[in-house]
Amino acid sequence: MSTTPQHLTRSHRGVSIRELPARAGILHLGLGNFHRAHQAVYTSAAIAADGGDWGIVGVASRSRSVVDAMRAQDMVYSVATISPEGTSLTIPGVHTDAFVAAEEPQRVVAGISDPGIRIVTLTVTENGYSYSPSTGHLDTADPAIVADLRGGGPRSTIGQLARGVQRRAAASGAPLTVLSCDNLAANGPHTKRLVREFLELLPDAEGAEALAYLESSVSFPSSMVDRIVPSTTPELRAEVSSLLGVRDEIPVPAEPFTMWAIEDDFAAGRPAWEAGGAVFSTEVGRYEQMKVRLLNGTHSLIAYLGALQGAETIPDAVTRPDIERAARAVLAREYTPSIQVPSGVDIADYERQLFLRWGNTALGHKTMQVGTDGSVKLRQRIPEPALLSLDRGEMPHLIALTVAGYLSCLAPRPGFDPGPFATAMKDAARERLAPIASQARSGSEIAERSIAELQLFGEELAERPAFIARVGDLVDTIVRDGVSAAISDSVDASETDVKAHASEVPA
């Protein structure tokens, strides 16, 4: 007769769990898997090396599941580092408390205003910043922003930050750092601008003091985070329970690779994150470019093409010869030429590691997960490198293929079945794309209406008819001849263009 093991808690013998920090110095918004396998791990290493009151209060946006499980497990959980060689476990043990923002919005504001909290970190995804992708400014039509400006318990992340800053300015005035860890270009200045714009919309009697405090005492360093962290599965729970000898309801799977580049601009001190391998750099923008384009941009291509070919996981997709060929082509010809490599980074080695990471069959990252929210993700990844190619007189065929793959997954032409993994992708733009796709007679119509009319990828790409036409042609190729044919078309055209360009360069 089998018995279910007891849940992981701090009292279990044989499980190495460090004592909780005495106090929290960090409030984290976005208590998902990524934070728990990334910032929490770095913070655990920092406290082990250098001490400090850097415990983390974790704030989930809406879901109770992780909060309830963390409370039941004395705020501990395991991180399972997974590779083909096996699985190893670590237990960060740095969270002092956790709660749900949607249930206790004023507690978020109180936490930000607490002078004991010196850093607010964020992993709320690109969707969590309530800004207009076409302008980069605060989306004042967002219902959550409208409600937060009226008062009451703030629902949006920007509203929570702004109201917390407002209360902190009126109370202690203690300095504060807000550290975005999301995939947004210049995420520090971007977050500060949105908070400032929110405060500027308040009546002078409410916003003036907070605005002055924001400029004098709140820093917004930029950062780049990188680690592949899939969703937790029942199979992982079973494996971790077997390894620990106790039941962990919320283990986090993660790849061995991890990177964190941070601008060293902290208004009230910081943990010794470098003890965990973090890099403090004045070139965070270059790290952002490298990661968002080379890793994330290519990841999107792999996910959409893989899903359309029936690949459930990224390793299954990238090990298919035609998809690997497309991935290597977009890296070499369209993304790498668009970036400035950070000092000390061996770009050839970085790209080699990318394929090892994507090919990690033990991790099993899903194409559906990577492809979800593409309308927001691609807006961060493709416009600038595409525009750089177009301005050089070159067509970015593989970036066009990425967009064609996205549209074929999210807005399939009538009669075209993109498959179950594409259908499972979630995207806020799906509702707007559905009527376009249902009425379209060609891929060109879908591309024109989504890229030019909806400006799904920004105003500048919306004004590039050659690029839009190329996307439309590739959508038609996918529907008519299949994904492999579209890949061959794109890669062959790219190779032809490279040879033609080389022949034009004087010897």
Image: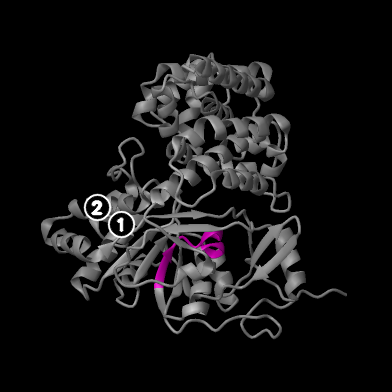
Which class describes the residues within 10 Å of circle 1: few (<14), some (14-19), or many (20+)?
many
The span shown in magenta is 26-38
The x, y position of residue 314, in whole percent, is: 66, 43
Q: Secondary structure at mark 2?
A: helix
Q: Earlier in the sequence, mark 2 or mark 1?
A: 1
Number of marks drawn: 2
Q: Is any part of residue 406 visible from this angle?
A: no
**Residue with the mark numbered 2:** 198
- Taking the image as shown, residue 254 lies to the left or right of residue 85, namely left
In the rendered structure, does residue 61 fall within the stretch colored magenta?
no
Amino acid type, label 1: Gly
User: Residue 69 occupies which quadrant of the picture?
Assistant: bottom right
- Nearer to the camera, 426 or 296: 296
**In the displayed structure, would residue 262 be above or below residue 472?**
below
Residue under the image location 67 percent in, 84 percent down: 12
Q: CA distance from mark 2 to mark 1?
A: 7 Å
Amino acid type, label 2: Phe
Residue under the image location 21 percent in, 72 percent down: 173
Residue 54 numbered tag: none
Q: Secondary structure at mark 1?
A: helix
The x, y position of residue 304, in whole percent, is: 60, 34
Residue under the image location 60 percent in, 76 percent down: 73
In the rendered structure, does residue 28 fall within the stretch colored magenta?
yes
Report if the CB atoms under discs 2 and 1 are less than 8 Å apart. Answer: yes
**Residue with the mark numbered 1:** 159
**In the displayed structure, would residue 212 be above or below residue 193?**
below
Q: Pick the quarter of the image with the N terminus.
A: bottom right
- Taking the image as shown, residue 249 lies to the left or right of residue 403, namely right
